[in-house]
Image: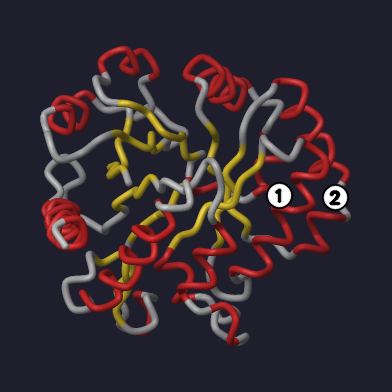
Amino acid sequence: MKKALKCALDRRQIEYKNSLDFIDGFEIHLYGDERDDFSLIKDIKKEIYSIHYPLDRCDIMEIANDFKTDYAKKVFKLCKDLNVGLVVHAESKYYEIMGSKLVDEFCDYIKDEDITLHVENCYRDIGAIEAIEIRRYIRARVGLEKVFSLLDTCHLMMSEMSFKFEEMSFSEAINRYKSSNFIIHLNDCIGSGEKETGGIHGTNFHYNKYLLNNILWKLYCLEKDGYFAKLVLECDEEDFIHNPNAVELAHNIDLFWNSYTDE
């Protein structure tokens, strides 16, 4: 198990997060505007596990409309240069993706460029099962070892589809998402997770350590079978340079994990 933080291509974030000895690596969080200073990539001292396409257009359908732009090509080049995967969202319906010529063109481009994709489950009406089906379609076009599922634990709870089927418990979802390139966005939510209804998205399990313990124990057991997860601590913060919620989550992860290994 490795612990990672989101890190923007921002000098102050990089300087501070490089100094954190309890963090193993980063997921690069892109914004798609002047905050993305690609020249700063050389200043990152920790391992980079993945690169997240800008949130305002990271759904597969949106990237399919964007992939020929100069900005997108710069992102793809960064993935290739660093030999890391690109995180994309599965927000559209499966049948929309399957019927899109633009998505097919995007997949052909990704295959030709030999880029790895991590397909992240999202929330509301796109749940964990549908995200796996979307990954299966993308994988058939790009390649079995180039497309992986990425499990976001907060999205799993927020989705209207996540727990409609008994088999998609947390344990089973982790089983279905595990892979040789296993990334989890680890966070919790309060209530619905939606600000509109008073919920909070991306908390640090402060009020739900029982669930954190269950997730970590599952991952600990999977390591015995050769599945080693990279945990991106994706907590909501007021200040993404100094991020106390992610720090608290990292501390609690270590407390639980060390209790397993001490037994």
Residue 191 x %, y %: 33, 84
Q: Which residue is label 1 attached to?
A: 61
The kind of residue tagged 1 is Met
Element type at mark 2: loop
Q: Which dot marks residue 116?
A: none
- Rendered image quadrant of residue 27: top left
Could you give the CA–CA distance between mark 2 and mark 1, rounded to whole angstroms? 8 Å
Image position of 125 with respect to 90: above or below: below
Residues under numbered marks 2 and 1 in contact, where contact means CB atoms less than 8 Å apart? yes
Residue under pointer 2? 100
Q: Locate residue 22, reporting x and y percent.
A: 14, 40
Task: Pick whichever, 103 or 23, lies toward us.
Answer: 23
Q: Amino acid at mark 2?
A: Ser
Please indicate whether residue 260 sits to the left or right of residue 75 in the image.
left
Q: Residues within 10 Å of mark 2 (few under 14, many from 20)?
A: few
Q: Horizontally, is 144 left or right of 29 in the view? A: right
Classify residue 114 as left or right of residue 259: right
Badge 2 or badge 1: first in the primary sequence: 1
- In terms of depth relative to the viewer, which is nearer, 254 or 248? 254
Residue 238 can be seen, yes or no = no
Please name the residue shown 12% across and 55% down the image. 251
**Residue 99 placed where, x, y %?**
88, 55
Q: Residue at x 16, y 58 (%)?
A: 245
